[in-house]
Image: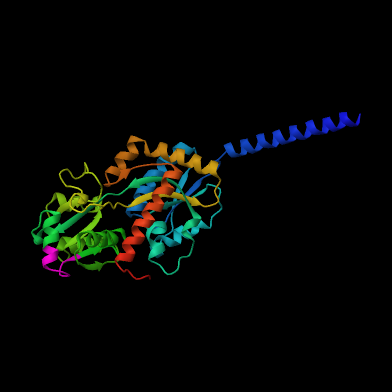
């Protein structure tokens, strides 16, 4: 009788455990069961905000829940990043991540309001190819001609950027390092003022995302010399990669989605699959292309690997350029 009761208890325990596993599986399968927040760490209307909304619209359909874009601007993107790093790791708070939050700011700032390692990569969503443009008054038409001119006039030519630590700043530093030239850096408080002065003739050179300069290239006010991708871009036919003249030049801002570090693997994988399906949509690709941006997705492991490579790349550029920490 004792053995019989023991066997009954064991069977009951096994049944209970199976039931709990089943319940847990059902609970997990329910993700997501309420709206998701996508934090954009910049003000509304900017490039990151526009692209994030393109992604959010279709991602909501893939997940079956609203994806609400919420802007938390400030401190070069660190305010929004800190909010996500500290959020519940349940998959309901995403960060629309740009290079600053994990790839560059850790090497530019003395202190940050969060640990960059507390953000876990889910998937890339876009690549923003950049283009080297010059004011037509310089009279140069190739990268080599620009390098030759800069060597004849060390420190006399300038390049404009959206601010210290911006991609447009680091792109210019990389140009100087690989070309062995010296330019004057003129940082602005945003892209708009930098573009205005460049087009107006107060600036000489800029390397920023294609979408910013497309209209000025088309109307002839700026001359494109090279793109920052390893291959030519359909957006700018006939404009060669900078790497043809400067081997190793490959610098295009990567935008991607991150979540709090402790988010369960299963949820991260589910979000990644939904993002991959989102980026594969022709409408998403077209809407991004209209902004001069390429829609690209990858896996969490691939994005983590890309993050490590970009961190190494930009840390070396920042160190070689002797950019002081703020």
Q: Which residues are magenta?
A: 149-158
Residue 131 visible from this viewpoint: yes
Q: Residue at x 30, y 49 (%)?
A: 128
Colour scheme in use = rainbow
Q: Residue at x 16, y 60 (%)?
A: 199
Position of residue 23 in the picture relative to residue 46 (left or right):
right
Residue ID at (75%, 33%): 14
Q: Position of residue 120 (x, y in %)?
A: 48, 51
Residue 257 location in percent, x, y? 43, 48
Which quarter of the figure has residue 322?
A: bottom left
Q: Is residue 165 visible in the rendered structure shown here?
A: no
Image-quadrant location for residue 78: bottom left
Say which quarter of the image contains residue 125. Answer: top left
Q: Is residue 205 left or right of residue 121?
A: left
Is residue 264 inside the magenta stretch?
no
Position of residue 63 measured from the top left corner of the image (x, y, whole percent): 48, 38
Q: Decide whether residue 154 is among the magenta residues.
A: yes
At 59% from the left edge and 39% from the top edge, which residue is drawn? 28
143 is higher (above) or lower (below) than 274: below
Q: How many marks?
A: 0
Q: Residue furthest left?
A: 139
Question: 305 or 228: which is nearer to us?
Answer: 305
When the figure is inspected, residue 15 is found, relative to residue 142, above or below; the finding is: above
Of the 4 image quadrants, the one containing the C terminus is bottom left
Q: Position of residue 47 (x, y in %)?
A: 32, 53
């Amino acid at each position: 009788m004792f053995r019989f009761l023991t066997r009954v208890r064991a069977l009951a325990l096994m049944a209970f455990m199976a039931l709990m596993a089943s319940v847990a599986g059902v609970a997990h399968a329910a993700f997501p069961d309420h709206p998701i927040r996508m934090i954009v760490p910049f003000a509304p209307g900017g490039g990151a905000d526009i692209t994030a909304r393109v992604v959010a619209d279709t991602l909501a359909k893939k997940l079956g829940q609203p994806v609400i874009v919420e802007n938390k601007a400030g401190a070069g993107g660190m305010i929004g990043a800190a909010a996500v790093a500290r959020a519940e790791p349940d998959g309901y708070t995403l960060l629309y991540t740009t290079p600053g939050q994990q790839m560059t700011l850790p090497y530019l700032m003395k202190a940050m309001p969060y640990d960059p390692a507390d953000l876990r990569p889910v998937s890339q969503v876009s690549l923003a190819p950049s283009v080297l443009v010059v004011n037509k008054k310089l009279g140069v038409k190739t990268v080599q001609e620009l390098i030759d001119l800069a060597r004849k006039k060390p420190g006399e030519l300038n390049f404009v950027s959206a601010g210290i630590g911006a991609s447009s700043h680091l792109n210019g530093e990389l140009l100087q390092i690989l070309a062995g030239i010296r330019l004057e850096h003129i940082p602005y408080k945003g892209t708009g003022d930098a573009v205005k002065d460049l087009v107006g003739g107060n600036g000489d050179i800029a390397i920023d995302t294609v979408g910013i300069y497309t209209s000025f290239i088309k109307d002839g006010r700026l001359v494109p010399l090279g793109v920052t991708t390893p291959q030519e871009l359909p957006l700018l036919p006939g404009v060669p990669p900078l790497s043809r003249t400067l081997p190793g030049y490959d610098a295009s801002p990567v935008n991607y989605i991150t979540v709090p570090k402790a988010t369960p693997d299963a949820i991260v994988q589910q979000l990644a699959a939904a993002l991959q399906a989102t980026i594969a949509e022709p409408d998403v690709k077209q809407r991004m292309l209209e902004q001069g941006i390429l829609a690209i997705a990858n896996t969490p492991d691939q994005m983590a690997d890309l993050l490590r490579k970009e961190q190494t790349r930009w840390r070396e550029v920042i160190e070689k350029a002797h950019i002081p920490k703020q």
